[in-house]
Amino acid sequence: MLIRIIILVLIIYFIVKKGYLKPFFNSSSKDDKLMTIEDKYNSKKKLEQDELNKLLEKINKRGYENLSEKEKIQLDKLSKK
């Protein structure tokens, strides 16, 4: 009986140690559920602003002419918001 308990404890230890249970306790899914509408809006705006800043930095370093067509469209779309 003692050997079974020791084996069970070792199995549980290695499962936890290797991270096999992390998908079941993923904190990001909990964070999404706890986010308010304002939090989601602000998060989306932050991502858009970061992307716009990245494009503007690229323009500053290399010039507008060196943006790809996709980047130019994205810049136009983000700058109108």
Image: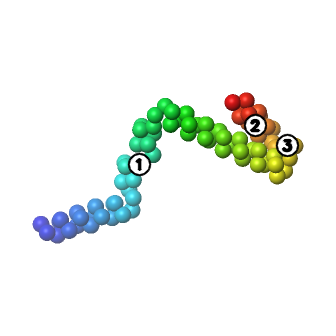
Q: Which of 19 and 74 is in front in this view?
A: 74
Q: Name the residue under label 1.
A: 26
Q: Specify the amino acid type for callout 3.
A: Tyr
Mark 3 vs mark 2, CA separation in Å: 10 Å
Q: Which residue is drawn at 51% across and 33% down?
A: 38
Q: Quadrant of residue 5?
A: bottom left
Q: Residue at x 82, y 49 (%)?
A: 60
Of tags 1 and 2, the one toward the viewer is 2
Residues under numbered marks 1 and 3 in contact, where contact means CB atoms less than 8 Å apart: no
Task: Tell me which numbered mark, 1 or 3, is placed earlier along the sequence.
Answer: 1
Task: Tell me which numbered mark, 3 or 2, is placed earlier along the sequence.
Answer: 3
Q: Specify the amino acid type for callout 1.
A: Asn
Q: Which residue is drawn at 74% across and 34% down?
A: 79
Q: Mark 3 points at which residue?
A: 64
Q: Give the total number of marks visible in the rendering.
A: 3
Quadrant for the C terminus, please: top right
Mark 1 vs mark 3, CA separation in Å: 41 Å
Q: In which quarter of the image is residue 3?
A: bottom left
Task: Tell me which numbered mark, 1 or 2, is placed earlier along the sequence.
Answer: 1
Residue 35: x and y in percent read 45, 37
Q: What element carries label 2?
A: helix
Of tags 1 and 3, the one toward the viewer is 3
Q: Name the residue under label 2.
A: 75
Quadrant for the N terminus, please: bottom left
Q: Residue at x 24, y 64 (%)?
A: 9
Mark 1 vs mark 2, CA separation in Å: 34 Å
The crowding category of the residue bearing disc 2, from other C-alpha atoms within 10 Å (few below 14, some 14 to 19, many at least 20), is some
